[in-house]
Amino acid sequence: MQKALFLDRDGIINIDHGYVSKIEKFEFNEGIFDFLHLFLKNGYILFIVTNQSGIGRGYYTQEDFNVLTQWMLLEFQKKEIVIESVQHCNHAPEENCSCRKPATGMVDAILNKYDIDLKNSWMIGDKQSDIDLAHNSTIEHTIAIGEKRINNSEYRFSTILECQCYLEANQGKIL
């Protein structure tokens, strides 16, 4: 079994400008590459789990999402970061699907393909639904990023950089 890092996209990987669907609007969060290298160095595999209701709401298309995702994955590859899988929910909230966070559909899809040790895995997000997804999926460890009040997160930091500094300083105890 492998330990994994599950990441939200908007607000964690990139700055959340609201319904980001074009390469020219995608801005990586400061420190995200070094942050992911820290997890890779400690034996984690990486997954992205992202609600993309902009597709279901008609703000952008599935093709827009696919093009942006392929570009993002290539940018990660240039930095020697492999994302094992990107799972997304393209439904609007009122569709009540089983994949929209905090429902577990995206994590369930990953678990159908990968043998993941959820007890030693992490979820990092910037919304309550990210942390609730972790609890609903039995992902043991959680990190909330940002200024919003998020309940039941094991750790909370204002930025990715702040989180990285803490994890590096406590590497043997946490990761």
Image (tube, rainbow, N blue to C red):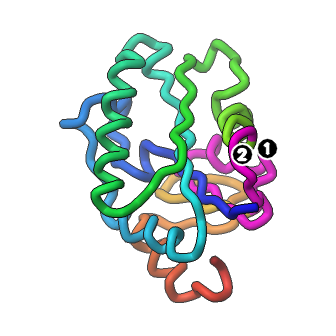
- What x and y, as percent, mark residue 164? 46, 74
Q: Is residue 90 left or right of residue 104?
A: left
Quadrant into which the C terminus falls? bottom right
Instruction: Tell me the crowding category of disc 1: few under 14, some 14 to 19, or many 20 or more residues within 10 angstroms, Cα based.
Output: some
Q: Secondary structure at mark 2?
A: helix
- What x and y, as percent, mark residue 7? 54, 51
- What x and y, as percent, mark residue 103? 73, 33
Q: Residue at x 72, y 24 (%)?
A: 98
Q: CA distance from mark 1 to mark 2?
A: 6 Å
* Label disc, if present, on residue 132 of the rendered structure: 2
- The residue tagged 1 is 136
| Mark 1 or 2: the one toward you | 1
Magenta extent? 112-140
Q: Residue at x 57, y 76 (%)?
A: 42
Quadrant into which the N terminus falls? bottom right
User: Mark 1 touching mark 2, by CB under 8 A?
Assistant: yes
Q: Secondary structure at mark 1?
A: helix
Q: Residue at x 63, y 88 (%)?
A: 172
Front-lying residue, 126 or 47: 47
